[in-house]
Image (tube, rainbow, N blue to C red):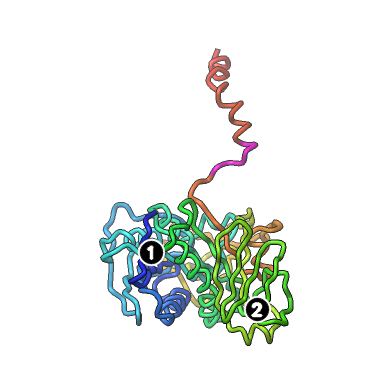
């Protein structure tokens, strides 16, 4: 991975998603990035809803691309998938140069556990990663009846310190090449849980050595050095920090769990009974919004089936979805490979060599 960020230019951030270029999550993220005046913001995103399309790509047909007006950004809507959009955006075919960082999101709904496999949001970041571009996928744990559109702006603001830290590491050529990040923000993003064992501060420059971190506060910046990890920079309003008596920003490093919503199928009689899925983790739906599939005509010969939830996710300690539900902002490093567990490798190491011999014997 070459160092793309130069001291004389603003870093280029390209934004994509799977909810579509008009989605409130993407628009809030772009607005917050532009408002910092620190970045050159590019947008290359699907022209319509593409949730849960995973890492599918368009192969046979050409993509239709249209310029879209988004204040402060150079933006294009693409007729393809999130992976298509990310690939096109980093190719230098559409934009004149390669972005320093790709951010996919902010998704309406969390992406944790096994549901990362289905996620178009994560696929947008993964596609950039596969092409050697640092990337981050961002999702907000939207819950119907509790969440509102303004939460996306709060989620974007909560991600700024991590974005700044990643770009700093890229500039200093320390950022790892073998992973990308998946960030999930809790439903109550304003009051998210803090991952530090320091509850009260009485001095202007406290210095604390916790079990998992060294915290330094100086002037108006909060810095955290994870043991044997790189330095992450947090910027905060210290007066507000002292009034609350705890750190207002915190991230928790997690690992991908195996959580998965149990789903089944039920037969329906109308296309309008299928609704837009807001989250692949909860299968939360919006009854007022229909997808293109819902609106497509079907002859009377077709049978119609709709997914439905048949059980809550199984939770595991200290994994992404469990920590998210506990109120943390979770940061999960991901890779592109899907190796099996060690015990499975050991099992097939014994089985495979004897398959042909066993087959020959049984044939006789």
Front residue of this view, candidates 361 and 57? 57
Which residue is tagged 2? 205
Position in image of residue 268 (x %, y %)? 54, 64
Return the residue nearer the eye: 11 or 216: 216
Disc ID at residue 100: 1
Element under disc 1: loop
49 lies left or right of 226 = left
- Mark 2: secondary structure: loop
Q: CA distance from mark 1 to mark 2?
A: 34 Å
Q: Residue at x 58, y 17 (%)?
A: 362
Mark nearer the N terminus (1 vs 2): 1
Q: Is residue 55 above or below residue 26?
A: above
Q: Locate residue 104: give its quadrant.
A: bottom left
What residue lies at 42% left-to-right and 76% top-to-bottom? 30
Residue 63: say if magenta: no
Q: Which residues are magenta?
A: 339-344
Question: x, y percentage for residue 128?
Answer: 40, 58
Residue 343 within the magenta-colored segment of the rendering: yes
Residue at (53% x, 45% y) in the render? 338
């Amino acid at each position: 991975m070459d160092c793309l960020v130069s001291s004389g230019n603003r870093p280029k951030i390209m934004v994509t998603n799977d909810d579509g270029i008009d989605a409130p999550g993407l628009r809030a993220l772009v607005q917050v990035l532009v408002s910092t005046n620190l970045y050159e913001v590019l947008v290359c995103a699907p022209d319509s809803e593409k949730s849960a399309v995973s890492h599918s790509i368009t192969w046979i047909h050409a993509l239709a691309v249209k310029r879209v007006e988004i204040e402060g950004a150079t933006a294009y809507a693409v007729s393809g998938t999130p992976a298509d959009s990310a690939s096109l955006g980093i190719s230098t075919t559409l934009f004149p140069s390669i972005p320093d960082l790709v951010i996919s999101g902010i998704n309406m709904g969390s992406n944790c556990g096994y549901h990362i496999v289905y996620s178009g949001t994560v696929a947008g970041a993964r596609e950039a990663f596969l092409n050697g571009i640092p990337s981050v996928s961002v999702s907000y744990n939207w819950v119907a009846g509790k969440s509102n559109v303004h939460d996306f702006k709060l989620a974007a603001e909560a991600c700024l310190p991590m974005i700044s830290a990643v770009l700093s590491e890229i500039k200093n050529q320390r950022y790892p090449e073998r992973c990308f990040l998946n960030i999930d923000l809790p439903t109550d993003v304003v009051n998210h849980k803090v991952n530090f064992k320091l509850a009260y501060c009485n001095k202007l420059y406290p210095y604390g050595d916790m079990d998992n971190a060294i915290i330094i506060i100086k002037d108006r910046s909060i810095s955290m050095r994870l043991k044997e990890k790189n330095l992450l920079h947090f910027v905060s309003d210290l007066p507000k920090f002292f009034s609350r008596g705890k750190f207002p920003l915190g991230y928790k490093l997690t690992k991908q769990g195996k959580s998965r919503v149990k789903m089944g199928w039920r037969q329906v009689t109308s296309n309008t009974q299928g609704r837009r899925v807001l989250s692949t983790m909860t299968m939360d739906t919006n009854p007022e919004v229909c997808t293109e599939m819902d609106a497509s005509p079907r002859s009377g010969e077709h049978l119609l089936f709709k997914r439905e939830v048949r059980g809550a996710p199984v939770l595991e300690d200290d994994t992404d979805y469990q920590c998210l539900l506990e109120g943390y902002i979770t940061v999960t490093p991901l890779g592109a490979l899907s190796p099996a567990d060690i015990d499975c490798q050991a099992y097939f190491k014994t089985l495979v060599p004897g398959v042909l011999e066993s087959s020959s014997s049984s044939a006789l």
